[in-house]
Image: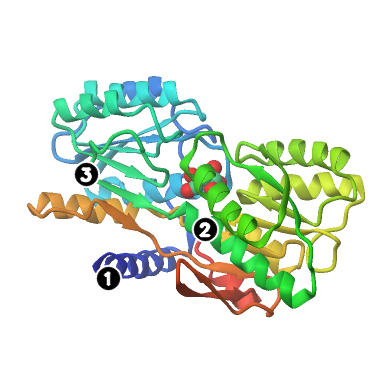
Amino acid sequence: MKKKLLALLLTLTMALSLAACGGGEDAAEEPAGDEGTTNEEAAGGETSGDLINIGFAQVGHESDWRAASTNSAYEVFSEENGYNLSFSDADNDQAVQIQAVRTFIQQGMDYIIIDPITATGWDAVLTECEDAGIPVFIIDRTVDDSDKYVSWVGSDFTTEGKACGEWLKAYAEAKGITEINALVIEGSTGASATIGRTEGFKEVADREGWTILDSQNGDFTEAGGQEVMESYCQSYDGQFNVVICQNDNEAYGAMTAMDAAGVTYGVDGDVIIVSFDSNKPAVQHVLEGNMNATFECNPMAAPFVDEVIKQLEAGETPEKEIYMEESWFAAEDIVSEITVNGEAMPVIHVTQEVLDARPY
Ligand code: GZL
């Protein structure tokens, strides 16, 4: 209960601060270029005596979600907020990301944040951080082979996958759809977001006797989603009625591929298409009926890490795991509530007002 209260208070604080600066679009400066800084630039990062030096080893720049996550970090870990941020964009390469962390250790950072590209391979470098006396925060994706970090702030990816399955079950029943033949466009292989969403949806699919015709890696990118969907349209022509895209950008690519193949989708189409993340463009697609639903994954972890740092600086012991609040969005006002992990969860019918209120 305490975790959820903290998450709610922080979410409200964040929403008010975003509203004050005009919402996510006006968030802090984008990183230099759209590639962010490279490790060389991070290696050249100067630590500052009177600011809190924080190194952020980011996954990359593969999706709108990632850009929102990076923007949130630049907005929170700013000089006016007392931070000196060194940022590294690993371009989805774990070896580059681990090297960035080692660079941050050499630079003598006060804190290090990691969004781990994959869930394993981290204990050695986290041990080096511990030996150097540098507290580490994990955000978004999880580290599954080490607990040498202060706190993890992120989402329950398996719950996201289950929510997608429970919504689809209720939606299909309401629409009189008795057979589900699904195609899945997965996120990056080995990422905990991919693992959780895949497992969560499959748990419901297996329980309901649905068929998952195929499940391939679209790498969380629009190009990846389009490439996989082009292949699916050839291999499974006329056999599928559901496409599960494990992030928004893959869904944009999948829609492009289905358009080219003459496959109709969305509220008035033959194929149900859903995504994860719920960035504003995806919620716009839901409002327009191009997508049937989207399941939020909150990218705004930075304010929560800022709060954890304040707790540490005050000599308090932060929570080890902090889950962020998330919502589920649908195009039609047919399914208003689903039960996931025994908990009743609302499904938000997307209106223009709902879209306008989206913070990213
Ligand atoms: C999930 C995050 C995923 C997003 C994608 O928390 O790691 O990575 O769902 C992003 O958009 O690329």
- Residue 172 on image: x %, y %: 73, 70
Q: At label 3, which amino acid type do we have?
A: Val
Q: In the image, is residue 216 above or below residue 158?
A: above
Per the image, label 1 sits on a secondary structure element best described as loop
Dot 2 corresponds to which residue?
Answer: 160
Name which of mark 3 and mark 1 comes first in the sequence: 1
Q: Quadrant of residue 41?
A: top left
Can you identify the residue that label 1 sits on? 1
Q: Residue 8 appears at what percent x and percent y? A: 34, 69
Closer to the chain start, of discs 3 and 2, is 3
Instruction: Tell me if 54 is positioned left or right of 315 in this view.
Output: right
Tell me the distance, in whole angstroms, between the alpha carbons under discs 3 and 1: 20 Å
The residue that appears at 59% across and 41% down in the rendered structure is 187
| Amino acid found under the numbered disc labelled 2 | Glu
Disc assigned to residue 150: 3
Q: At numbered mark 2, what does the secondary structure look like: helix, strand or loop?
A: helix
Q: Compare marks 2 and 1 and give the one earlier in the sequence.
A: 1
Ligand 1 closer than 8 Å to label 2 CB: no
Q: Could you tell me how far apart the alpha carbons at marks 3 and 2 are, in whole angstroms? A: 25 Å
The local secondary structure at tag 3 comes to loop
Q: In the image shown, does 34 or 64 lie closer to the viewer?
A: 64
| Residue at (63, 55) in percent of width and height | 206
Quarter occupied by the N terminus: bottom left
- Left or right, residue 329 beside residue 270: left
The answer to whether residue 296 shows anywhere in this view is: no
Tell me residue 111's x, y (percent). 22, 38
Tell me the number on the disc at residue 296.
none
Image: 245 above or below 333: above
Residue drawn at x 28%, y 51% is 305
Q: Residues within 10 Å of mark 3 (few under 14, many from 20)?
A: some
| Type of amino acid at the residue the image marks with label 1 | Met
Labels 3 and 2 touching (C-beta < 8 A)? no
